[in-house]
Amino acid sequence: MKPSFAIIGCGRIAKRHAEQVIKHGFLAAVCDIIPEKANEMAALYNAKAYYSVEDMLAASTQFDVISICTPNGLHAAHSIKALEAGSNVLCEKPLCINVEDGKKMIAAAAKAGRKLFVVKQNRYNPPVAFLKALISSGKLGKIYSFQVNCFWNRPAEYYTGWKGTKDLDGGTLFTQFSHFIDLLYWLLGDVAAVKTLTQNFAHPSIAFEDTGAVLFEMASGAIGSLNYTVNSFNKNMEGSITVFAEHGTVKVGGQYLNELEYCSVAGIDHPELPQGNPANGYGFYQGSMSNHDKVYENLIIALKDDAHEFASAGDGLKTVEIIEKIYNS
């Protein structure tokens, strides 16, 4: 029998989830506090529409998976309610916007005996997966240093509704660049110390920075930098990670970590990698690579196989810990 899914939050990213849900199961219910949004998605997928999380969970038998697609600041509350109702949860990034909420989410999953996952789709970008394999195999040797660049465009009209607010958005590193923090941890390990400078140059309506520069000392001893902004003129310019190591230098770049721009590694020719998916398109701006197909393919496996590698709540919490460390520094 195909697994049953529900989606909480029927905004733009929810459509990406719904498209994949119907490939692997069936969408039984959707929920949004704006009835028109819930009704529209329910009609598209023959699902039941609800206008409050409590009503949806009270009216239905448990779902196999509930996907959380609400604003960042609501991820914790909605995930915990879904877990307590007996469903596994796939939470959109970021897992939450503070460490204490993340710990409560993980505790709720353990108490309910259910699984809590987080969306980290950039791990499936072909050049990122190639870099991960190089590092994991030891072919790069000792990692010396790294540079992470996130140069995107978010115009003033992007920041409507909850976006740009401290309580529901949380900050540029949570909404725009948490995937890059996840990859920093996934590829290079934990962060020992940070030094940070941030400014808001061009977005007076938002409650936090639009630009930042961060210096890292990793637990491994490697050092590196993160430079990020949403002020790239007119369009996204670059999303990249460059690693300098004992036996090689590799840069994964392009607009959204979609190209192997440089690869000089001892004993390895420049590989021909499979074509990745296009970026998420949202009309007047672009997001990261659209890998929700791979997220759901791996989710289905991970639900049955605890040993299958998939972005866990622990991984999501580590991202939040690092972002908190950056902001608090």
Image: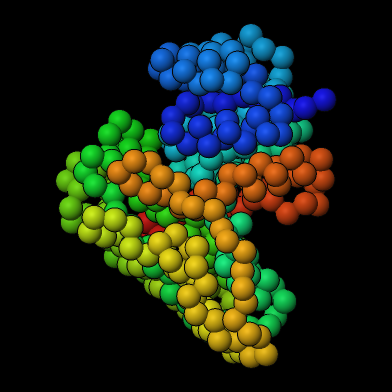
Locate residue 274: give its quadrant.
bottom right
From the viewer's perspective, tell me whether residue 76 is left or right of residue 295.
left
Corner quadrant of residue 138: bottom right
Is residue 319 at all visible to an observer of this figure?
A: no
Up-down relation of residue 171 to residue 255 (above or below) = above
* Residue occupying image coordinates x 61% and y 57%: 124
Image quadrant occupied by the N terminus: top right
Question: Of residues 265 and 183, which is closer to you in this image?
Answer: 265
Residue located farthest toward the top when viewing the structure as drawn: 59
Colour treatment of the image: rainbow
Residue at 71% over, 34% down:
24
Q: Nearer the viewer, residue 71 or 322?
A: 71
- 68 shown above or below 46: below
- Where is residue 293? Give x, y as percent: 62, 44
Quarter placement of the C terminus: bottom left
- The residue drawn where x is 41% and y is 45% is 281
Q: Position of residue 151 (x, y in %)?
A: 33, 62
> Relative to 276, is 227 above or below?
below
Question: In the rendered picture of this protein, how many numbered marks are placed on residues?
Answer: 0
Task: Report whether 146 appears left or right of 314.
Answer: left
Q: Is residue 124 visible from the viewing direction of this image?
A: yes
287 on left or right of 183: left
Query: Residue at point 67% right, 90% down?
Result: 267
Residue 217 % position (x, y): 48, 75
Q: In the rendered image, which quarter is residue 327 located in? A: bottom left
Relative image position of residue 86 (x, y in whole percent): 71, 24
